């Protein structure tokens, strides 16, 4: 027969683990891990596809693979328009997936109020970034650039514009627009001419 004090200490240690999972909840723990994984996936996507180390940010994956026939019967090489479109679609798809997971957390009845508030704050931040990126793209396009993609990530911004040679005045205009819309200083802004 076990000593009463030994049995009590075993019950207390088992009770601590059980109490922890009851307090946090297994489902909430899984939801929190999912939110972290989605955040990591978005960050990894941004790091891989906007890294200045590869020169153009996409390591050659966005280069044309052949010729495309236009409506006039001629043949022209695929231009950067497909790059800008593909980048915007990819960005939107990643955000939609993140918003879907965050909304699932908010809608989950078993989620704690703290977890729901964090998810709502993340949703609000993503919506704010979407609005700022859209404003930046519109304003830069209004300055005479044909195409523009803006990607915000916290205190940094990556701006890709359709231009062969960016002049100092153009870079200053882009920096000013991004600063006015986001408060990000030029040190945190990367501008890529495509």
Image: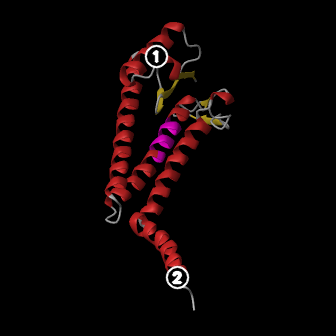
Q: Give the range drawn in magenta.
A: 85-94
**Magenta part, dominant SS:** helix
Residue drawn where x is 51% and y is 23% of the image? 188
Whether residue 190 is visible, yes or no, is yes
Residue drawn where x is 67% and y is 29% of the image? 53
Q: Which element type, helix, strand or loop, lies under badge 2?
A: helix
Give the residue number, with chain letter if any, for mark 1.
175
Figure label count = 2
Viewer-nearest of discs 2 and 1: 2
Q: How crowded is mark 1: few (under 14 residues within 10 Å), some or many (20 or more)?
A: many
Image quadrant where one finds the C terminus: top right
The residue nearer to you, when weighing 23 against 178, is: 23
Q: Position of residue 150 (x, y in %)?
A: 46, 29
**Residue 161 lies within the magenta run:** no
Q: Where is residue 176 in the image (x, y as percent from the top left)?
A: 42, 15
Q: Residues within 10 Å of mark 2 (few under 14, many from 20)?
A: few
Give the residue number, with chain letter if any, for mark 2.
7
């Amino acid at each position: 027969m076990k000593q009463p004090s030994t049995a009590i200490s075993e019950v207390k240690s088992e009770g601590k683990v059980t109490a922890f999972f009851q307090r946090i909840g297994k489902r909430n723990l899984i939801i929190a891990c999912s939110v972290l994984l989605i955040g990591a996936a978005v960050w990894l996507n941004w790091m891989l596809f906007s890294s200045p180390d590869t020169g153009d940010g996409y390591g050659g994956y966005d280069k044309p693979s052949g010729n495309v026939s236009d409506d006039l019967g001629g043949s022209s090489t695929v231009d950067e328009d497909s790059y800008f479109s593909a980048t915007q679609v990819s960005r939107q798809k990643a955000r939609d997936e993140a918003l879907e997971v965050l909304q699932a957390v908010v809608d989950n009845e078993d989620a704690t109020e703290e977890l729901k508030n964090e998810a709502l704050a993340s949703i609000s931040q993503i919506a704010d970034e979407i609005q700022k990126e859209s404003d930046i793209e519109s304003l830069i396009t209004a300055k005479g650039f044909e195409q523009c993609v803006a990607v915000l990530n916290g205190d940094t911004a990556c701006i890709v514009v359709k231009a062969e040679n960016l002049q100092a005045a153009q870079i200053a205009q882009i920096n000013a627009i991004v600063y006015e819309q986001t408060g990000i200083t030029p040190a945190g802004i990367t501008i890529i001419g495509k």
